[in-house]
Amino acid sequence: MITLHEEITVERDIKDCFRYVADFRTVAEWDATALNAKKRTSGPIGLGSRFTVQCAVGPAKVTIEYEITEFYPWASVVLVGKSRFFEVRDVITFTESEALTHISYTAEFKYRLGISTFEQQLESGMRAMGSETLQGLKSALDSLSSPPGISDCTARADRWVAPGVAMFSKWGYRRSIAQRNPNSHFLDGRHVVLTGANSGLGLATSVALAEAGADLTLVIRNPAKRDELLETLEAETGRSDITVEIADLSLMAEVNALADRLLAKNKAIDVLINNAGALFNDYALTSEGLEQSFALLLASPSLLTRKLHPLLEGHSTPSRVINVVSGGMYTEKLVCDRLIMTPAKYQGAQAYARAKRALTVLSELWAAQWQEDRIIVNAMHPGWADTPGVASALPTFRSITRRILRTSDEGADTIIWLARAKEAGEISGKLFLDREPRTSYLLAKTKESAAQRAQLESFIDAQIDNASAH
């Protein structure tokens, strides 16, 4: 048996340290040998939670199945991991002194298949690995990451267009894992408003932000799904204190009513996530006379965000607006007069892409306008994610690409990072994919004119005014 023991001290609250380490999915962020980690059990992290961790051992990959066998918040956690080659028992204890947390980590390895005969040869390498791992954990908890830039690899891929688009797949997501910074920040006491919260990206984001401690206000359209959503979140996270608001965001009257309810509560908003959306294959008008794609995908987030501006501005820590767009917008150029398609020319995917292009431009405009109001505004696109919306609206696309589609969790990862990460609050006016800023234009011909940018907000306002008068 080889026993490794390392200790670190970090300037973090003991509760944060315990929560971060006990959720063993984070091991891929701080252990250099861990390639990926997944939670295998439902419910909040605690006694009996199980995780699968894939590690690199030299040229080989080893899968380790972990289980939490002892769990004492915020003092200690014990995990037992089993693989084909060894069993490991990790004992992690936490003690607090003033603003510091001391972490003691002991790992006991028992080898199988005759590998124990090579323990002496293995020991020095294992000790070096243990030291590196704990320094990785210290770095993750110290959280000194700077805002990300566009990597040389990504810049080259975007210049060639096709490789840039290929990064929308699950392979692009997996490529990004090795480059990303740890995300050890929690959202306790921070109010997050999220639209479109009950399925796909929205549900994955809701679960993750609930686990991160956010004070959540979730907006959904169908009141019949409210109880199911709350039950799902409580079962997954143990949280029973989440607020759900009902609003059909394709109707400007309901957007106004939602904003008025939130304004009446006078509760500051730290993060607003405009995620609600749908791809409509058939042309239709809302009861207010707006084309439904334009109404839901562009008019709605524009109206809601600007009405909630008083709850977003002037915080000591800048608030954040996150607009969920789509890689489809790369095919379209902003021309305001083409944002509302006629019945004869309507194509659902094109209407969707045009609205998302406009929302990306709005994100850039708001970031510049609201800089002095201490509001960070960014857009993100999730890549090609296998969501219920894709399955219902784009069945042919899904059938062709299903082997390379991301999961909802993978698609939502950058939304969660933009809401949580300290460094994400230091950069504004960008479009993100996989926690990395990306070009807004893969093709030069899709770059809009300055006149179209200047016209966009007044064009949207004119359509909303017409709906109000309908």
Image (tube, rainbow, N blue to C red):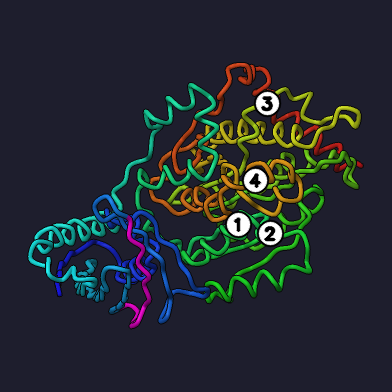
- Asked whether 68 falls inside the magenta stretch, the response is yes
Q: Which residue is mark 2?
A: 219
User: Would you place residue 427 above or below residue 112 in this image?
Assistant: above
Chain part drawn in magenta: 61-74
Q: Please give the label number shown on residue 332.
A: 3
Q: Amino acid at mark 1?
A: Val
Local SS, label 3: loop
Q: Residues within 10 Å of mark 2 (few under 14, many from 20)?
A: many
Q: Marks 3 and 4: which is nearer the front?
A: 3
Local SS, label 2: strand
Q: Please give the label number shown on residue 305.
A: 4
Q: Is residue 275 left or right of residue 378?
A: right
Say which label, 1 or 2, has the lower sequence index: 1
Residue at the front extreme?
Answer: 114
Q: Marks 4 and 2, Cα distance to the nearest angstrom? A: 14 Å
Say which label, 3 or 4, has the lower sequence index: 4
Q: Marks 1 and 2, Cα distance to the nearest angstrom? A: 8 Å
Quarter location, residue 134: bottom left
Q: Amino acid at mark 2?
A: Val
| Image marks 4 and 1: residues in contact by CB distance under 8 Å | no
Local SS, label 4: helix
Q: Marks 1 and 3, Cα distance to the nearest angstrom? A: 29 Å
Q: Where's the C terminus, which quadrant?
A: top right
Q: Marks 3 and 4, Cα distance to the nearest angstrom? A: 24 Å
Q: Is residue 350 left or right of residue 76?
A: right
Q: Is residue 210 visible?
A: yes
Q: Which residue is mark 1?
A: 193
